[in-house]
């Protein structure tokens, strides 16, 4: 039996609730992955901002260990510096003979030199290739024809674009482009006969929630109900929570509803790319030998407690993340695992699944026993997270 391939799909700011049963957000491709694999219903990020969570994902360590405790681009290096002596699971796979390709958002450390971290080939978000792709479609550098747009203006803060819908095809999105780059890599790697690892890391569904009209039209803001906690005044919470909520104090529910519709539409756009990729792997004979992991760096409040985005407030919506793992030939397909798992568990899990050497300094635990329906002795009864921002 040849060694399995690995397709890792990393979303950004993806609330776990949108793939829960009964969610109004439609993500049939991801739901199909869950039906063919295992959905972890209590997976939590170790940090609700991108860089600390992503560094934990790759090293299997907590932010206080790897040092990247804030976003790479928001603080001086002395406040958040990645420990480059730590090995990553991608280096281990490369050493084991895997062809490795990374496409999209990195934000693990500041060098953006991914060859240092075990990636044979990579293209990062914002590359000249994407600009050329849009030109080839006859599109401007950024969407211009908005049918819906909302900018937030709040004293003491810079104005910022929150959501919008525009008249362009899905082929012009960075999500479509990055998945296409990933598919090209998979096919070229497969032609060599070597196993491959493709990591596709999109900016969806991070704000601003900007989507083509064809996706926005799938959701009616008038049909979206406020979360049960929307009216929470946070009086029994730390003052910083109320300060962050003050940004939205003059925002009526109508705008929250439109933002939610755009967010759901963004999720559906991402889901279509997942479905396109699965179909391609099936058509090219690679599907039955490919492990798929679908997850996100952190969640999104999306109106819960009257908040948007993510941050210091440790609410379920911001810290619980989607996690689906599909293995070829999995006998207990469609299962759910309610054990508490964390972001940094994925590094030892990947190496365990692919039979590569473990990371000696990893602090997470392999999820392979849970995937096999077992519960190791001493499994955690609480999830762990940090926030130093």
Image (spheres, helix red, strand yellow):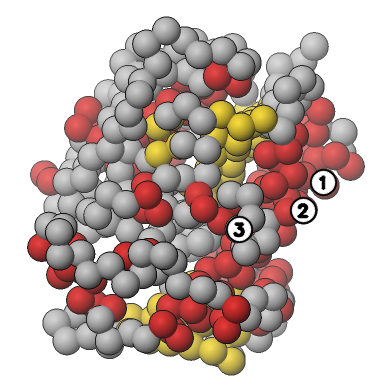
Label drawn at residue 276: 2
Q: Residue at x 22, y 54 (%)?
A: 312
Q: Are marks 1 and 2 in contact (CB under 8 Å)?
A: yes
Provide the secondary structure element on which disc 3 rests: loop
| Residue at 24%, 54% in the rendered image | 313
**Which quarter of the figure has residue 186?**
top right
For marks 2 and 3, the one nearer the N-term is 3
Circle 1 or circle 3, nearest the eye:
3
Task: Say whether disc 1 or disc 3 marks the residue closer to the N-terminus.
Answer: 3
* Label 2 Cα crowd, 10 Å radius (few <14 / some 14-19 / many 20+): some
How many discs appear? 3
Question: In percent of the image, x 52 and y 38: which residue is there?
Answer: 41
Q: Return the residue found at the far top.
A: 377
Q: Nearer the viewer, residue 44 or 162?
A: 44
Q: Residue at x 28, y 67 (%)?
A: 232
Residue 49: x percent and y percent? 32, 51
* Residue bearing mark 1: 280
Mark 3 lies on residue: 23
Is there any visible trace of residue 150 in the rendered image? yes
Query: For this rendering, which residue is in front, 300 or 188?
Result: 300
Q: Residues within 10 Å of mark 3 (few under 14, many from 20)?
A: few
Question: Would residue 175 be visible to someone looking at this image?
Answer: no
Residue 55: x percent and y percent? 35, 37
- Disc 1 crowd rating (10 Å Cα; few below 14, some 14-19, many 20+) is some
């Amino acid at each position: 039996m040849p060694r399995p391939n690995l397709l890792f799909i990393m979303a950004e700011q993806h609330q776990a609730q949108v793939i829960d049963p009964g969610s109004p957000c439609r993500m049939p491709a991801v739901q199909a992955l869950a039906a063919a694999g295992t959905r972890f219903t209590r997976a939590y990020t170790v940090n609700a901002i991108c860089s600390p969570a992503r560094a934990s994902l790759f090293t299997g360590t907590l932010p206080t260990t790897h040092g990247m405790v804030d976003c790479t681009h928001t603080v001086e290096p002395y406040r958040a510096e990645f420990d480059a002596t730590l090995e990553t699971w991608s280096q281990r796979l490369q050493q084991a003979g895997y062809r490795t390709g990374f496409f999209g958002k990195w934000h693990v450390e500041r060098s953006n030199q991914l060859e240092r971290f075990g990636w044979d080939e990579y293209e990062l978000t914002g590359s000249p290739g994407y600009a050329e792709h849009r030109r080839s479609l006859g599109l401007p550098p950024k969407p211009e024809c908005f049918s819906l747009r909302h900018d937030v203006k709040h004293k003491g803060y810079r104005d910022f674009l929150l959501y919008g819908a525009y008249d362009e095809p899905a082929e012009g999105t960075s999500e479509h482009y990055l998945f296409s780059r990933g598919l090209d890599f998979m096919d070229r790697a497969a032609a060599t006969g070597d196993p491959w690892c493709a990591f596709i890391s999109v900016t969806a569904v991070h704000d601003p929630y900007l989507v083509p009209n064809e996706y926005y039209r799938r959701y009616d803001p008038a049909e979206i109900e406020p979360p049960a906690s929307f009216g929470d005044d946070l009086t029994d919470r730390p003052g910083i929570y109320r300060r962050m909520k003050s940004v939205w104090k003059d925002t009526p529910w109508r705008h929250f509803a439109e933002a939610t519709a755009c967010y759901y539409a963004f999720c559906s756009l991402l889901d279509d790319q997942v479905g396109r990729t699965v179909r391609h792997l099936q058509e090219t004979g690679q599907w039955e030998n490919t492990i798929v992991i679908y997850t996100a760096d952190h969640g999104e409040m999306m109106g819960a407690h009257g908040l948007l985005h993510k941050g210091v407030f440790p609410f379920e919506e911001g810290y619980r993340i989607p996690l689906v793992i599909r293995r070829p030939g999995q006998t207990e397909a469609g299962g759910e695992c309610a054990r508490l798992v964390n972001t940094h568990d994925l590094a030892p899990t990947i190496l365990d699944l692919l039979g590569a050497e473990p990371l000696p300094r990893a602090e997470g635990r392999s999820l392979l026993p849970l995937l096999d329906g077992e519960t190791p002795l001493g499994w955690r009864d609480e999830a762990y997270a940090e926030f130093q921002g």
